[in-house]
Image (cartoon, rainbow, N blue to C red):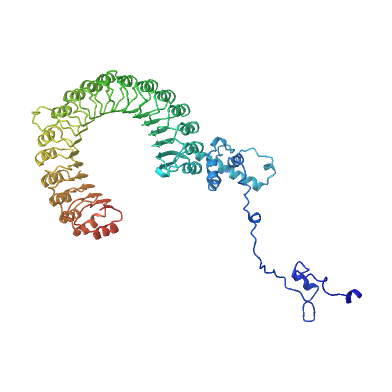
Amino acid sequence: MSKLFDFTGDNAFFHGVSMYKNPKESSLFLPRGHEVDAYFPPCKRSRVSGPFVFSEERFEKKQTSIDVLPDECLFEIFRRLPGGQEKCACACVSKHWLMLLSSIRSDETCVQKIKVAPKPQETCSIKPTESSKDDNKKGAVANTTRCDDEFEDLDIIDEGHLSRCLEGKKATDIRLAAIAVGSGPRGGLGKLVIRGSNSTRGLTNAGLKAVAHGCPSLRVLSLWNLSTISDDGLTEIANDCHLLEKLDLYQCPAITDKALLAIAKNCPGLISLTIESCPSIGNESLQAIGHCCANLKSITIKNCARIGDQGIANLFSSAGNQLIKVRLEALSVSDVSLAVIGRYGNALTDLTLVSLQNVKERGFWVMGSCKGLVNLQVFSVTACQGVTDAGLEALGKGSPNLKRVCLRKCSFVSDNGLVSFAKAAASVESIQLDECHRITQAGLFGVLVYCGQKLKALALANCFGIKDLLFGFHFISPCHSLRSFSVHNCPGFGDATLSMLARLCPNLSQISLNALEGVSDVGLLPLVESSDAGLVKVNLSGCVNLTDKAVSTIAKLHGDTLEMLNLDGCKNITDASLCAVAEHCFLLSELDVSKSGITDFGIAALAEGVQVSLQILSLSRCPLLTDRSLPAFEALGESLMGLNIQKCSGISHGIIDMLMERLWRCDILS
């Protein structure tokens, strides 16, 4: 009791904090009320009026445990990821993870590729681990489903259906790594085209290595203007992408024979190879390609200074019996290369030679005289001074199956060589002559005489030697096989030549006369009237002396077969021609009357005509057209897919806007 009276309150109560952990527990022992004479201070946090001291140690951001792992550990984790979705999710975390994922080869993953069983109830045949033996039935079923999905993803990777093209600033290592990681579960990357690279973050070998590691199904690779890509990147492609079938290298100066040797060794299924403006590639790589790539069918070599006769000779001696298409351009080769081609090119069907300045007449003569080009069907020569009459005749004799011939800038080929070639190559179906100034009217008619059994197409362009002369060819049998005749920018070609062609070519279905000021109605009408087969395509652009009479005759005689009519630049064409077309040409699908004298009346007549299939209408630079043609355009818009009204000063911008709104299915050029 003495202690009770000695109580002062200093040590009995703890001020500021309740004696109970839970404030509600105090009511169990001390019921609150007015009769209780006890004071309990509120349990509130005291207001701090002093300055707040920031502690860097307390608020320091701690690095997560996954970031402190070395790349070796992350590599082991990433290569055990079950599917493509998980890999893509990890690749989105950071660039570091993306590049690390892209460095994992397909053969380094831990998931073993096993074929999915044909029956859906059967499970995946994977040997269970010790931990999986104790799993319950539900877990085993879930595990089986997961395995099947993995194997399906792996099957898709090998298909290679996707195609990607990167140009300019989009070509970076990061983007290529993302493509390599993300393309697997979406069908597998099969084709990759890279044109140029980013100026600040240029494409390097690291991006190409990422594609090699992640895209083993790659079949087509095209590299354009990439000075930063060297042998290391292309060698990785060769080591990992064994299914590569087509390789194109354009302006890649850092790539040498080393990379192509790796391609030849590891990609035996290579079918097509293109090398252009690659100064570091030489003869050694061509020899390896010809020896190792047994499926090589097509090769193109252009402007490679280190490639010469040795490389071409080794290539054809090894792979000549399998090459089908060959193009050689701007190379320092001589007559030896052409002799080897003529000897070993027995499988060639398409041969193109461009700007071979060191090849002389003997080279072309030997190539034809070897009689090895028995399967050659297409032959094209451009700017080769060695092409002469003797070489052309020998080529015709040595190529019995030749069907298409194109001679461009062959200034030493004359009428004698062309006629001799026509006599020797009896199976030729198409002849194209461009800038062959020694060819005259005699050579032209000689071809029609001696190739009259199979010749189907004849085209002349920029041949200034052809003059409009009169010859007596009444005894010549007509060329019934010729279907297409084209002349472009031959100033001497005129009405007299057309009149002669009218008697020689009665079955023409396609006529193209471009920029011929010497052609008028006098020469064109006999040619049009003599066509028994019916004209299908007629191109008379730039023939400024033609009038409505010729167009009306074409429409009346061939309206039931005519599908395309081009009168661009024929300034004498008026509404009368459109009225004739509207009345007779019900199959017309393409019409061009640009830079002519048509008006709104002609467009209205065309809209009321029988054109039910007109899809393309060109009316550019027709100053007489006005806004009154709007209803006609709307009527024609039911079938139109393209309308050209550029620089028609009489049509206002408001009408153009209305046309774009109402003819929403038609592409309008204004």
Q: Is residue 211 above or below residue 343?
A: below
The structure residue drawn at horizontal position 33% and vertical position 25%, both measured from the top left corner, is 348
Which quadrant would the N terminus be assigned to in this image?
bottom right
Up-down: is 65 above or below 264? below
Residue 209 or residue 589, whichever sits in front = 209
Q: Is residue 588 visible?
A: no
Taking depth in this image into account, of 155 and 494 the one nearest to the observer is 494
- Examine the rendering and report whether any part of residue 219 can be seen: yes
Outermost residue to the front: 51
Residue 190 percent coordinates (x, y): 45, 38
Looking at the image, residue 49 sits to the left or right of residue 621; the answer is right
Question: Which quadrant holds residue 30?
Answer: bottom right
Q: Determine which quarter of the picture holds residue 416.
A: top left
- In this rendering, would 428 be left or right of 92? left
The tally of labels here is 0
Judge by depth and name the residue closer to the eye, 31 or 71.
71
> Which residue is painted at 66% across and 66% down in the image?
50
x, y (%) of residue 386? 24, 23
Residue 159 horizontal/vertical position (percent): 47, 38
Q: Nearer the viewer, residue 28 or 33?
A: 33
What is the residue that sits farthest to the bottom in this orientation? Answer: 34
